[in-house]
Amino acid sequence: MKHIISVLVENKFGTLNRVANMFSARGFNLASISIGETEDPEFSRMTIVTHGEDQIISQVVKQLNRLVDTVKVTDLTRQPHVERELLLMTLKLSKTQQHEIFELINVFKGKVVDIKQKSITIEVIGSPDKINTTIDIFKPYGIKELSRSGAVAIHRGE
Amino acid sequence: MHSSGQTLNGSEIFFECLRRENVEYIFGYPGGSLLKVYETLYDVKDIQHILVRHEQGATHMAEGYARATGKTGVVLVTSGPGATNTVTGIANAYMDSTPLVVFTGQVPSTLIGNDAFQEADIIGITRSITKHNFLVKDVKELAITIRKAFFLANNGRPGPVLIDMPKDILNASCAFNWPETVEIRGFKPTIKCHINQVEKAAHKIAKAKRPLLYIGGGVISANASEELKAFAIKKNIPITMTLQGLGAFPGNHPLSMGMLGMHGTYWANQAVNTCDVLIAVGARFDDRVTGKIETFAPQAYKIHNDIDPTNVDKNVKVDLPIVGDAKHFLAAILEEMPEKLENLEPWLAEIQTWREKCPLTYTADDKDLRTEFVIDEVSKQTAGNAVVVTDVGQHQMWTSQYYIFNNPRSIITSGGLGTMGFGLPAAIGAAFGIKDRPVILFCGDGGIMMNIQELVTAVHYKTPIKIFLINNSYLGMVRQWQELFHKEKYSFTDLSDSNPDFVKVAEAFGCKTFMADNPDTARDAIKKALAYNEGPVFVDFRVVKKDMVFPMVPAGGSISDMLLARLNPKTMV
Ligand SMILES: Cc1ncc(C[n+]2csc(CCOP(=O)(O)OP(=O)(O)O)c2C)c(N)n1
Ligand SMILES: [Mg+2]
């Protein structure tokens, strides 16, 4: 089962490495990891997506907690949370399909961030599932390059 | 001692911090990035620096010292090769939860990342084998970093911490301020156990007909032997110990069943197999203990107390996890226990029948020398009160079986990593910490060569260790597996044609030496060695070549697969 884990860490060099390293050293699956500074510059928040049975996930959470640079570890999976991912994608632009492409961009509430003679770069924000679907749908039009941010997530407010 | 607020350079701050951490010994080796530190050290009189001959030796010495005393071992090495030479020792300390602080010199900050002379990314290299590590980037951070490192190393589950100190930081100056308190947001070990859980455990144990204590090294780290004794003896609960747990409970007490697991006693393993409540304390269900997980203590309600939550439910799913310090747990459980327990006499009687059915025995004649005899004899001559250090291999397992450990912090051995070469330096380190009991090393003829250079250190410091070489001319433990499981293909384990004359080697280093090749000479050599305290004494015990350690549960096997004797009887010599 997929789990999304939010980790508050010390904003220090090497923290990302420690976390990623722990996953590889212990053979845990690591689907995505994203990190950024929080409202307090002393901390960063990491969002980790991993897959595994409950017993493994409980080890993942404990091992994360054991790292000295982690301050708080929360498995958001079964708690109310919002999860988003950013997709940047460059598509081939051909005259014949131009119209269809623009239509689809609208359907996915995407944004055009760059446009050239033969290519168009768009951004789409959504749940990782939505991002997967977006990619599938655009595939036939010719994806030149894409980049995903990995999921970021946060607890829903009270 | 310098006072707070005084301007000091990094090297002076370094020693000032060690003073405040009450460090007695530094095990170290100098080099380019540490020149300033060694310059300062020249005039330091209140901390003793022990010069080793290889940095791996320094780490194992610090480990031996730490395990024998409970204090944190301190290592000081230069950058690059000095640092990488400590890696095995750090990994060993990590696996066996030994508190160390390892200081590595580093190239100047400005050169880091440039493939500078003697640069190694020791922070990256040791990330997964330290509890935590630090690169000091500013001399103002040095004191607090050292404070944190010592705090981390010896709080919660102990372990090694590394501090990388660039050369320019050691030369730079700032006002010295010793932080009286230390606060690490991400490190809050649970010491006190959840009392509800303890209560639940107490009720379970009270209703058990066949309870069993399974004791690991955590009990020794927590200095909880007295609490263990009080609980077990009062409630009459039998005890088995892991390799690292030996000595937590006196081996000569009738409730002690010795070690469990792969080379554990028959009766301890049968008890694990049959118990209805298993109380694991400071143990981690290692595969050398459990064998096949599915058949480990199959009938038991499992209670597990450990200070490290990651140990709980890692290998074996337990029924009642109790995170916290073993000392607290054992004291609390005795408090919570109802007065009335089940009658445990039938259970103890059953254990006794197993004990009588398959005791640990060996046949001795007056011609051939067997390791079991040597260890048995040492155990008797020292009344189980020595500090015993081992290397890795057959002699290690025989030590666990035939030396009767009556005190905690008395077996010092590489359990988790199984590091050959650990023994000699660890024994030296232990002897720096322990002056009132003999420190004895049992080491194989393979392993002794892995850190033989430290004989110099022992001789130089007149360290009165007893080096008992168990010389079977084989990489004995590997040979045993080859005989049992690999078609008797003795591939590269016969050392008889290549081993040196160990007596001559030891003599050349300056050791007092003896040789023994039969029980009589052995008994005599042990007596003389124990009486000699002017420096290290080295005894070459020429034991039979093809002896095997039994009982043995083959790797990944169940208790029912236990081998009690040689499958294929052949001559031993
Ligand atoms: C550094 C290292 N290399 C290899 C091994 C694998 N190993 C385990 S026991 C052993 C044989 C040890 O032989 P010896 O030191 O003579 O002890 P004995 O088993 O004969 O008592 C070996 C090679 C190890 N544990 N450590
Ligand atoms: Mg040998």
Image (tube, helix red, strand yellow):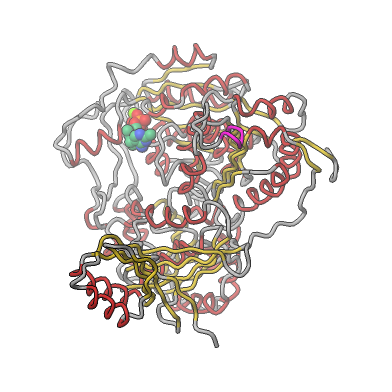
Q: Quadrant of ligand 2?
A: top left
Could you tell me residue A105's position as x and y percent? 31, 77
Given residues B67 and B371, the one toward you in this image is B67
Point out the image quarter for the C terminus of chain B. top left
Q: Is residue B48 magenta?
A: no
Could you tell me residue B334's position as x and y percent? 57, 70
Point out the image quarter for the N terminus of chain B. top right
Q: Residue at x 56, y 75 (%)?
A: B194
- B215 left or right of B260 in image: right
Could you tell me residue B116's position as x and y percent? 52, 29
Q: Is residue B200 visible?
A: yes
- A13 left or right of B261 in image: right
Given residues B523 and B222, the one toward you in this image is B222
Does residue B573 lie above or below B497 as drawn? below
**Which stretch appears magenta?**
B107-111
Q: Residue at x 61, y 53 (%)?
A: B152
Q: Residue at x 29, y 55 (%)?
A: B291
Q: How many marks?
A: 0
Q: Residue furthest left?
A: B487
Given residues B543 and B200, the one toward you in this image is B200
Q: Is residue B213 visible?
A: no
Q: Residue furthest bottom?
A: A158
- A124 left or right of B69 in image: left
Does residue B560 lie above or below A135 as drawn? above
- B129 left or right of B27 in image: left
Does residue B447 lie above or below B197 as drawn? above
Secondary structure mainly formed by the magenta segment: helix
Could you tell me residue B417's position as x and y percent? 41, 43
Given residues B120 and B311, the one toward you in this image is B120
